[in-house]
Amino acid sequence: MAKIIIIDDDQSILNYLKILLLQTGKFEIELLNDSRKAFKVIEQGDFDILLLDMYMPNVNGLDILGYIKEQKIDIITIVLTGVEDIDFAISAMKLGTFDYFLKPIEDEKLLDVLDTAIEKSRIKTIKEESKGTISLKTLVHPQEFKDMITQDKKMLEIFYFTEKIALTDTSVLIWGESGTGKELIAKAIHKISNRKNKKFIAVNAGVFASEIFSSEFFGHTKGAFTGAVSDKKGLIEEADNGTLFLDEIGELSAPIQVKLLRVLQEGEFYRVGSTKKFVTDVRIIAATNKDLFDEIQNGRFRKDLFFRLNINSIFLPPLKERKADIKLLAYHFLEIFSKKYDRNIKKISDSVLKIFQNYSFPGNIRELMNIINSAMIIESSDEIKENSLPHYFLENIKVPGDSTTDYALKTLQEMEKEHIKKALAFNNWNKTKTSKILGISRVNLIAKVKKYNLE
């Protein structure tokens, strides 16, 4: 049985939760109403899960969360609080809170989250036991990661963790910069999961305007708006019994976030223009390149939606933290584009590889792929050389080391403006291509073009 400790200064809540959890027969429970004893009890108790009140005298919930993180205590924390406080919620998230409930607590939802927490604890234990010994041979489904070229140990551990959470059927939130392979991980989860024989549908939330997205996502009825000449299924219906991958989840408008939350909580939605309730069974995998903590703090992303999505998290490292993979990936793309363009280019010069190693790749793997693609078209010899690399890229890497030229003294905004302008010019002002190279959404690029008056 999972071992749970509940810390709350209200004895009546402790008693209620104890009775509720004991009835399930799944938990061994310990109660504590004096938060001053929390540090010692948690450290010595070997608990799996902590149910924690936030507002307590002497030692509050944040003090306890901070101690758990500082001491690296392996325990899953679920916060229970009677006060809606966004600052406390953000702080709790950053300290690793698994979920966050406002009192009074809905019994069924709490029990569902506890079941998920138990599964997460089991997966974490398996992962820790295998740490340091993970290789491609360790994986049960290595073929599902064949498109993710790597020899990086962190990435192999991510693959291993991905295999485990794929079988849980819970929501997943994939964090990482643009171009790091978030959709590839989402596809791997789907192919390994019990939904593998159903549809996998991917949608970029940053591509659609709010009104269009609502129609595309939930569907609409005939006459719901101008141009709605017939009923239309939305993506959520198309993905029924399968997996829906929502990239750039941080771009969703507030009204869409509310509707998505209902899908996650109740499995229900309404088509645009309809009062008929539809029921769906779909797994949501979301991805973001934004700091959602900041988005929540600034009122742009719902805290409750964050917790529903973030049941399992995967963090993909940027390419600059995977230096050993750069050469491997560069030659992988060289082989792909050699076949595509029927070219006999087999080598990348040492000077180019050195440049790659010293470059930060803000667009990550996608940017490296586009650079090799561009160089392959231009290069006339049998080797990729510096003069075949894109002009925007070559100009961007020519930053003086110790000099105090005007370039070195420019602000970050000025440098960003120049970099975007060069990339746009290189792509003949094609915003779709440029956004891919830069590793940002097309919507984000358009906003920056307007901001810097680059039209």
Image (cartoon, rainbow, N blue to C red):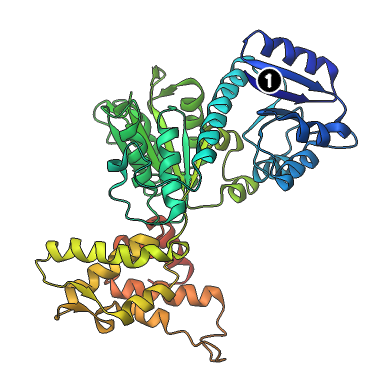
Residue 395 is left or right of residue 315, and the answer is left
The residue drawn where x is 32% and y is 51% is: 148
Q: How many marks?
A: 1
* Position of 273 relative to 70 (above/below): above
Residue at the farthest front position: 133
Image spot of residue 311 (x, y percent): 53, 33
Mark 1 closeness class: few <14, some 14–19, many ≥20 residues within 10 Å: few
Where residue 404 sits, quadrant-wise, is: bottom right
The residue drawn where x is 74% and y is 38% is: 85
* Position of 253 relative to 24 (above/below): below
* Position of 402 relative to 375 (above/below): below
Foreground residue, 410 or 430? 410
What amino acid is found at the position of numbered circle 1 in the picture? Ile
The residue drawn where x is 72% and y is 20% is: 104
Image spot of residue 12 (x, y percent): 82, 15
Foreground residue, 246 or 32? 32
Foreground residue, 239 or 33? 33
The residue drawn where x is 76% and y is 36% is: 43
**Residue at which label 1 appears:** 105
Image spot of residue 162 (x, y percent): 42, 39
* Position of 444 relative to 208 (above/below): below
- Quadrant showing the C terminus: bottom left
Foreground residue, 414 or 293? 293
